[in-house]
Amino acid sequence: MTARLKTLILSLSVALAAALSGQPAGAADKTLTIYTYESFTSEWGPGPKVKEAFEKSCACTVNYVSAADGVALLSRLKLEGAATKADIVLGLDTNLIAEAKATGFFAPHGIDSSAVKVPGDFKDDVFVPYDYGHFAVVYDSDTLKTPPKSLKELVEGDPAQKIAIEDPRTSTPGLGLLLWVKSVYGDKAPEAWAKLKNRVLTVTPGWSEAYGLFTKGEVPMVLSYVTSPAYHIDQEKTERYKAADFEEGHYIQVEVAGMVKSAHDPDLAKSFLSFMVSPAFQDIIPTTNWMMPAAATSKALPDAFGKLITPKKTFLMSPEEVAKNRKAWIDEWLGAMSMN
C-alpha cells in the first residue's frame, strides 16, 4: 500500500468517525482553555453544566484550569505572561479589571453585550459580566441569636463570636470586604481592622475554605454573599443560615470574563463570551454559583431568592480607584491584622 493511499484511507476514517459523532472533521482538535476559580469548576458549581451546554454548540472541548479565587487567577496570569495557555479568564471582578487591563494580556471582546443588566449598568469593551452579588456576613441562626446589624456592630461586637474571612491578597471576597470597610470607615479603616481582628477566627486563601469551616460548624459567621442562604433554602430546605442586613449598606461584586490576546482560537473564545450572556448560560448561574444572573434567564428564579435580604445601599468603587490604592490598602490591612 502506497503512502498516498494510506493517507487517503486515514483521512476517510477520520471523516467517517466525525460524521458518526455528529461533529465536523477536526472538531476534536478545538479546545477552549478557561482559567477560573475552584468553586466554579467543582461538581456542584456551574462549570460542569456550562461545559456540557457549550460543547453541544461549539464542536469543541472545554478545558478548565482552576485557581483558588479571582485574585489568584490574576496573579497566575501575570506569572505566565504571554506564555499562558488561557483563552478565557473567567472569575475576575470589577475591582480587578483596571489592573488586569494594565497587563496588556486582554483583547476587546467585540461581542454584543447589550443583554447584560447589572446594578450600576456596568459596561466594558474588554470584560463581560456574567453574574453579581452583594457581599454579606452569613451567620448560623441556631448558634448566633444576636447577629450584627451593621458593619460597626461587626467590628465592635463580642470577640467570642468569631467570623471566618478571606485574604484580600488571594480572594475576591476578601478584597470585597477590604473595600467595604474602606467605603464605610475611610481613613479610620486601620483602626476598624485592629478591632475586627479580635473576632476573626481565621483568614483563608479563598471562599471555599471559609464557607466550608462555617457549614461544618467551626465558626458561627463567614464573609460570603447575600445570595448564599438561597442555596440552603432551595437545596437543604432550611432557613438556618441567614445574611445579616447591615444598616450602612453592602459592597457589590460583579464577576466578569475576558478573552486573552494570545487565545488560540479568538472566534471560539468570542463565541463563548456570547454564549455566556445567553439564557443557556444564565439559567445555570442562580442554582449553581448561587449569584444573581447578569442577563435574562428563560425562567423565573427559584422561590428561595425571594426570601433574601435587600441591601439598603450599594457600595462599589471604580476599577481605577481600586487599582490605584489596592496595594496600600492591603498593606494597611496587613499592618492592622498583625498588631498584638
Image (cartoon, rainbow, N blue to C red):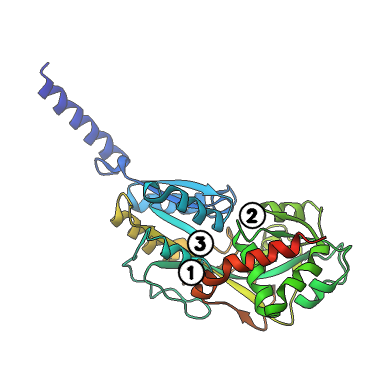
Q: Are marks 2 and 1 in contact (CB under 8 Å)?
A: no
Q: Residues within 10 Å of mark 1 (few under 14, many from 20)?
A: some
Q: Please name the amino acid that badge 2 sits on.
A: Gly
Q: Is residue 186 above or below residue 276?
A: below
Mark 1 or 3: the one toward you: 3
Horizontal side of residue 51 vs 12, given as left or right: right
Residue 26: x and y in percent read 26, 40
Report the residue that reaches farthest toward the top: 1
Q: For numbered disc 2, what is the local secondary structure?
A: loop
Tell me the residue that label 2 is attached to.
206
Whole-Å distance between the Cαs marked 3 and 2?
13 Å
Residue visible at 85% across and 71% down? 157
Tell me the residue that label 1 is attached to.
297
Horizontal side of residue 204 vs 319, given as left or right: right
Quadrant of the frame with the C terminus = bottom right
Q: For numbered disc 3, what is the local secondary structure?
A: strand
Tell me the residue that label 3 is attached to.
92
Q: Please name the amino acid that badge 3 sits on.
A: Leu
Residue 24: x and y in percent read 25, 44
User: To which quarter of the image does residue 326 belong?
Assistant: bottom right
Residue 336: x and y in percent read 74, 65
